[in-house]
Image (cartoon, rainbow, N blue to C red):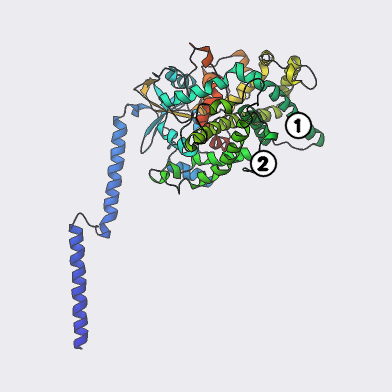
């Protein structure tokens, strides 16, 4: 009996000691609070956060703008889109259908506020006029968050993820290579020969009554043309063993860029770890292997020419010093990768969409074919017979291309932020220029869902839309120096190359267009 009393006494004293300790912990602010008080404090913190957010919005001059429905590219949206396979940017297309949102609206994020502009004239103001001074006084630049992501994807700086003097240095290397007077005479015969080869593939499909995957075929053909200009070697002369074949090169690029819409690299701290980048690093290995082999193959043959000019990589390599230095080699690799991806993704997918539009509209198809026969004649076109001025006579075909660009814009949006306080539509921005929404804005394009190339014949310029329809987010060429007028869309698209795969999966395309 005595032992039971001793045990009970000890148990009482133990419980009492625990209670005293818990009371001491709860009275000490440096220790954990009692479990029962935590939900109340969490609820209080949530209420305070909501109140702070609301007050912050009320004090913002943008508060009077209509609000974007939901959030814009929040981590939760990205995660849900990845799980469900949905279009993360589908909301952008619907803005143009809402009269209250089609001009300008605001997205209130927990960490930042973004103005979404869906008006073509305002987009032109932001993208073209806002950055028009090449000498350095431009007022907006690429959004810092997207620059950081692009540097993560590429492993360092290139023309597509730099600003200011660094961007000008990259542009100075690339601009001369994309002069129309240089690139067109060099590539045109090869392009015509490659198009003849593509026609043979289509003809066989018609005879055998088999479908032709134009996405795949246009990707291979576009890469053939780009590789020829970059390395002086076509697909049949390059080694694709690292990526598993020429038809695997495009998908390998897409594996890299799919990380752009991944959640983990976007997170603070975690996004900078090797674990968060492991998928990207793994995807880059075969791609870098192919590019390094191609660079070596080209530079080992100094006699190579594309038409009458040296391959682009030979000109670029001269800017990076000895390639035995790993840093120089990596810098050249990033520049080459950005240019190849920008060119292939933009051009090939645009062409595939154009074929899809024409395949469903026989009258448009017949009119394009009739115009081509008038310009080039009947039968197989000889590569040496095609001149630049002949292409300008393809008026209706150019209108079709513009209409495809409008319906499937080259970039869903372009994110910029101000370097100084600037006013767009009466408001100071950072802005996301909703090119996808602007292309479907009925105030600019009557019956926007209708495929109608003739709108470009009667209205050659539609509220400045042509200046932004290819996603032109960079400074306009320096009109004081005619040598600066180069194919900006082809080079500058490197800044958007990483978005292309996300856009592609969502039914959008990238396009190259000269400013």
Which numbered dot is residue 202? 1
Residue 487, percent across and down?
56, 21
When the figure is inspected, residue 189 is found, relative to residue 335, above or below; the finding is above
Image quadrant of residue 251? top right
User: From the image, which quarter does the C terminus lie in?
Assistant: top right
Which numbered dot is residue 23? none
Residue 354, percent across and down?
65, 27
- Front in this rendered view, residue 513 or 230: 230
- Nearer to us of marks 1 and 2 is 2
When the figure is inspected, residue 294 is found, relative to residue 183, above or below; the finding is below
Which residue is rendered at x = 82% and y = 34% of the image?
207
- Front in this rendered view, residue 249 or 81: 249
Q: Looking at this rendering, what residue extends furthest in the bottom direction?
A: 1
- Residue that mark 2 sits on: 245
- Front in this rendered view, residue 31 or 66: 31
User: From the image, which quarter does the N terminus lie in?
Assistant: bottom left
* Left or right, 328 with reference to 355: left
Image quadrant of residue 372? top right
* Left or right, 246 with reference to 73: right
Assign a secondary structure to mark 2.
Answer: loop
Residue 39, percent across and down?
29, 54
Q: CB of mark 1 within 8 Å of CB of mark 2?
A: no
Along the polypeptide, which appears first: circle 1 or circle 2?
Answer: 1
Residue 463, percent across and down?
51, 16
């Amino acid at each position: 009996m005595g032992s039971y009393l001793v045990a009970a006494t000890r148990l009482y004293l133990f419980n009492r000691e625990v209670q005293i300790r818990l009371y001491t912990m709860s009275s000490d602010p440096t220790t954990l609070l009692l479990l029962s008080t935590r939900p109340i404090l969490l609820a209080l913190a949530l209420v305070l956060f909501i109140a702070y957010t609301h007050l912050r919005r009320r004090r913002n001059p943008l508060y009077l703008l209509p609000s974007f429905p939901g959030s814009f590219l929040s981590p939760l949206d990205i995660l849900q889109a990845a799980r469900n396979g949905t279009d993360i940017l589908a909301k952008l297309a619907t803005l143009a259908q809402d009269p209250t949102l089609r001009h300008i609206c605001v997205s209130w994020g927990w960490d930042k506020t973004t103005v979404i502009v869906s008006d073509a004239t305002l987009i032109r103001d932001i993208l073209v006029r806002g950055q028009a001074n090449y000498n350095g006084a431009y007022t907006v630049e690429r959004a810092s968050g997207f620059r950081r992501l692009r540097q993560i994807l590429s492993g360092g700086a290139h023309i597509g993820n730099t600003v200011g003097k660094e961007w000008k240095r990259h542009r100075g290397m690339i601009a001369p290579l994309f002069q129309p007077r240089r690139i067109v005479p060099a590539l045109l015969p090869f392009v015509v020969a490659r198009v003849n080869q593509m026609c043979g593939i289509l003809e066989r499909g018609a005879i055998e009554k088999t479908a032709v995957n134009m996405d795949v075929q246009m990707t291979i053909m576009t890469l053939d043309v780009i590789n020829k200009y970059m390395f002086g070697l076509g697909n049949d002369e390059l080694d694709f063993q690292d990526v598993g074949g020429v038809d695997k090169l495009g998908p390998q690029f897409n594996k890299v860029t799919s990380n752009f819409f991944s959640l983990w690299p976007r997170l603070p701290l975690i996004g900078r770890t090797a674990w968060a980048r492991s998928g990207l690093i793994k995807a880059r290995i075969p791609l870098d292997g192919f590019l390094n082999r191609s660079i070596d193959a080209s530079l080992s043959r100094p006699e190579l020419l594309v038409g009458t000019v040296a391959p682009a990589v030979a000109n670029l390599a001269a800017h990076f010093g000895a390639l035995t230095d790993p840093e120089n080699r990596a810098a050249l690799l990033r520049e080459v990768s950005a240019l190849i991806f920008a060119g292939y993704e933009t051009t090939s997918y645009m062409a595939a969409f154009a074929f899809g539009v024409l395949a469903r509209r026989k009258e448009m198809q017949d009119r394009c074919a009739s115009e081509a026969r008038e310009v080039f004649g009947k039968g197989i076109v000889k590569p040496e017979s095609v001149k630049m001025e002949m292409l300008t006579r393809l008026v209706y075909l150019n209108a079709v291309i513009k209409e495809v660009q409008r319906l499937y814009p080259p970039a869903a949006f372009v994110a910029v932020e101000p370097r100084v306080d600037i006013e767009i539509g009466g408001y100071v921005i950072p802005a996301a220029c909703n090119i996808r929404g602007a292309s479907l804005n009925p105030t600019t394009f009557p019956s926007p869902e209708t495929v109608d190339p003739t709108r470009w014949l009667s209205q050659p310029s539609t509220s400045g839309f042509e200046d932004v329809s290819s996603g032109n987010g960079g400074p306009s060429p320096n009109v004081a120096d005619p040598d600066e007028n180069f194919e900006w869309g082809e080079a500058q698209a490197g800044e958007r190359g990483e978005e292309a795969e996300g856009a592609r999966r969502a039914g959008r395309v990238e396009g190259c267009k000269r400013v």
